[in-house]
Amino acid sequence: MKSRAELEEILAAQRANRRTLSPVPTLRKRGRDLLGVLAVIIILVASGAAMFFAMQWTTPAPARTETTSPSVSPLTSTSTNISPTFMATPVAMKVCTNIPDGRLHVRFSAGDGSEVRGYLTEGEAVQIALDPNSELDSQIIKGNLWVRISFPVAGWVNARYLCKSE
């Protein structure tokens, strides 16, 4: 059996040995792991940025047009009101926003919340579209009559901005 002094020497040697095997190798391994993860993140970000810019450069930009929405209130509108029974045959009408150089939004579907498909200028002639029963293709949304037009841009417009063409 070893004496207490020998055991203390062995314990001291082990402690000294533990100090020389400091956590540096562990930190080095962790550092390499962190560098690997960082490299992967950088590669992913760079490839995402490359894809974004490639799409931006290869996709044609849509034609930019000034969007001036008619701001005539229903109470002050001087255009002719159109009732759904007004038209039994295709009728040509014109845009009457009563705004100089005004533009009327043509939408994909009836209602102010629908996306804009195109624009019509003040005084431009339009062709009202009819449904298969030769009746006016219209919808009333939030108290406003919306009619489908077929020319020059197919879509939906608020009927209060249309008037009879002379």
Image (cartoon, rainbow, N blue to C red):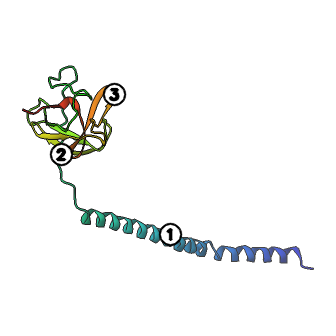
Q: Quadrant of residue 23?
A: bottom right
Residue at point 31%, 37% (across, down) = 110
Residue at point 52%, 69% (across, down) = 34
Q: Earlier in the sequence, mark 1 or mark 2?
A: 1
Q: Earlier in the sequence, mark 1 or mark 3?
A: 1
Q: Nearer the viewer, mark 1 or mark 3?
A: 3
Residue at point 89%, 76% (across, down) = 3
Q: Are marks 1 and 3 in contact (CB under 8 Å)?
A: no
Q: Position of residue 87 (x, y in %)?
A: 21, 32
Mark 3, secondary structure of its residue: loop
Q: Position of residue 95 (x, y in %)?
A: 14, 35
Q: Residues within 10 Å of mark 1 (few under 14, many from 20)?
A: few
Q: Quadrant of the N terminus?
A: bottom right
Q: Residue lying furthest right in this view?
A: 1
Q: Position of residue 114 (x, y in %)?
A: 32, 41
Q: Are marks 1 and 2 in contact (CB under 8 Å)?
A: no
Query: Which residue is identified by label 1?
Result: 37
Nearer to the camera, 10 or 56: 56
What amino acid is found at the position of numbered circle 2 in the picture? Phe
Q: Nearer the viewer, mark 1 or mark 2?
A: 2
Query: Which residue is identified by label 3?
Result: 142
